[in-house]
Image: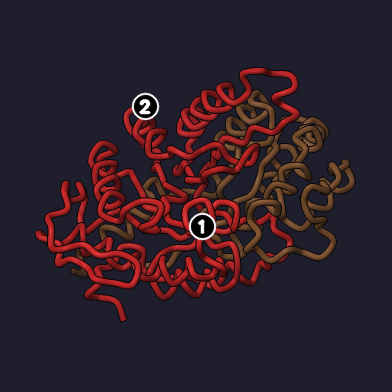
Chain colours: A brown, B red
């Protein structure tokens, strides 16, 4: 039996939570989201999302905080990122995947480093990929 | 829960205004980021295939990126978040061959995700005649179950369908690890979960779309590596 679901989102992690929050603002997620709904016109369009070429306004700190609170993005210092990722794990997600497109490269490198040092080891304790387990199980079952 | 990264070669105009080589910069930077992700312990790198999507995604030839990453990395799994298997975009036999080849050069670290195109702009580039984008669901369902057969049958039995045909042929190479690479489906709306479940693919979903609900994380899909004969 195989079952699996993963979730994709964005992550902004820094030693200082305010630096992470500002990185999220600077990444202009609203502009990115405008393109999501510009091209993915088979996606359900949430109420309030304007039609292209009208842009979703850039997100301010308050909006970033609200998005973080509902789990739409991972944002904060390593302790906060750990708590936010644990919420996703508790919801049943098998993988969480972070888009690296929006943040500045140096910010993304710092996010990756901090998640790798402080978050991943506390949540993903299996050195084997889940999909390898699935594949091995499929061989045994066949 | 495991961790992964997703690249798509997003080249917004505001970056182009400050960097005339922004497209090249993004392409090269994202390769560096995947290598850094592997170093940090991330398990998956997802690479979606998209076409014609100015600014949003310039990652058209994701098989080329996958081929590079196959030998530049050693642990991270490389996932074609989307290979587009619609016959009008990529012939299914060539997709099956490409996946099996990537399975070899990654030595079992490649995973096969599929999708139908981002929306009407991308879909109509390859299927200019269709009126309803939902028709791509029928085309996808027409082809997706054939991939395990192409990999697992010594000589693929061939296919005659509404959208594509292939006489019996050996599809080569065969995958490196048996039975075949894991299969994923990019799910952008609720019916896509049903499609993923029915076709035995795992589902991936964006959390930043506001219609997403946490309860949907429990809408699990089945069996990413089952043989067609085992499907119920």
Assign the C terminus of chain B to one quadrant of the image: bottom left
Closer to the chain start, of discs 2 and 1, is: 2
Q: Residue at x 59, y 62 (%)?
A: B188
Residue B198 falls in image quadrant: bottom left
Which of the labelled discs sits on residue B72, or is there none?
2
Give the side of residue A67 with respect to residue B75, left or right. Answer: right
Label 2: how many Cα within 10 Å (few below 14, some 14–19, many 20+): few
Residue A116 location, x and y as percent? 55, 35
Residue B146 location, x and y as percent? 27, 65
**Callout 2 touching callout 1 (CB < 8 Å):** no
Give the side of residue A17 with respect to residue B6, left or right. Answer: right
Residue B148 location, x and y as percent? 25, 62
Of helix, strand and loop, which one carries label 2? helix
Q: Compared with residue B120, is residue B216 higher up or lower down, i.e. above or below?
A: below
Residue A77 location, x and y as percent? 73, 37
Asked whether the residues under marks 2 and 1 belong to the same chain, the reply is yes
User: Can residue B188 be seen from the camera position used here?
Assistant: yes
Label 1: how many Cα within 10 Å (few below 14, some 14–19, many 20+): few
Q: Find the residue positioned furthest to the left.
A: B154
Between B223 and A120, the residue placed more toward the observer is B223
Count of marks placed on residues = 2
Of helix, strand and loop, which one carries label 1? loop
Give the side of residue A88 with respect to residue A3, left or right. Answer: right
Q: Residue at x 29, y 41 (%)?
A: B102
User: Can residue A94 be seen from the camera position used here?
Assistant: no
Q: Residue at x 63, y 23 (%)?
A: B22
Q: CA distance from mark 2 to mark 1?
A: 38 Å
Which of the labelled discs sits on residue B67, or is there none?
none
Badge 1 is on which residue?
A: B128
Give the side of residue A90 with respect to residue B165, left or right. Answer: right
């Amino acid at each position: 039996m195989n079952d699996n679901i993963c979730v994709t989102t964005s992550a902004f992690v820094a030693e200082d939570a305010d630096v992470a929050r500002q990185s999220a603002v600077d990444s202009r997620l609203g502009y990115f989201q405008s393109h999501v709904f510009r091209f993915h016109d088979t996606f359900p369009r949430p109420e309030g999302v304007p039609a292209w070429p009208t842009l979703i306004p850039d997100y301010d700190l308050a909006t970033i905080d609200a998005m973080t609170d509902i789990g739409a993005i991972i944002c904060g210092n390593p302790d906060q990122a750990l708590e936010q990722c644990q919420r996703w794990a508790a919801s049943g997600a098998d993988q969480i995947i972070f888009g690296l497109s929006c943040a500045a490269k140096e910010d993304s490198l710092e996010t990756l480093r901090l998640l790798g040092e402080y978050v991943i080891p506390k949540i993903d304790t299996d050195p084997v990929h889940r999909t390898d387990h699935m594949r091995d199980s499929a061989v045994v079952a066949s | 829960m495991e961790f992964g990264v997703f690249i798509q070669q997003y080249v917004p105009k505001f970056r182009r205004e400050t960097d005339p080589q922004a497209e090249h910069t993004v392409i090269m930077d994202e390769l560096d980021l995947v290598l850094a992700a592997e170093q940090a312990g991330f398990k998956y790198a997802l690479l979606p295939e998209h076409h014609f999507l100015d600014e949003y995604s310039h990652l058209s030839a994701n098989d080329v990126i996958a081929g590079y990453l196959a030998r530049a990395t050693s642990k991270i799994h490389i996932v074609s978040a989307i290979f587009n298997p619609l016959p009008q975009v990529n012939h299914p036999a060539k997709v099956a061959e490409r996946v099996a080849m990537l399975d070899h050069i990654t030595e079992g670290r490649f995973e096969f995700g599929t999708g139908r195109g981002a929306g009407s702009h991308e879909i109509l580039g390859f299927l200019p005649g269709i009126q309803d984008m939902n028709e791509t669901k029928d085309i996808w369902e027409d082809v997706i179950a054939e991939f395990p057969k192409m990999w697992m049958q010594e000589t693929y039995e061939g296919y005659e369908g509404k959208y594509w045909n292939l006489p019996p042929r050996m599809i080569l190479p065969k995958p490196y690890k048996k039975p075949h690479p894991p299969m994923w489906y990019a799910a952008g709306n609720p019916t896509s979960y049903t499609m993923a479940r029915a076709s035995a693919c795992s589902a991936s979903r964006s959390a930043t779309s506001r219609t997403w609900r946490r309860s949907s994380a429990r809408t699990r899909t089945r069996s990413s590596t089952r043989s067609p004969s085992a499907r119920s």
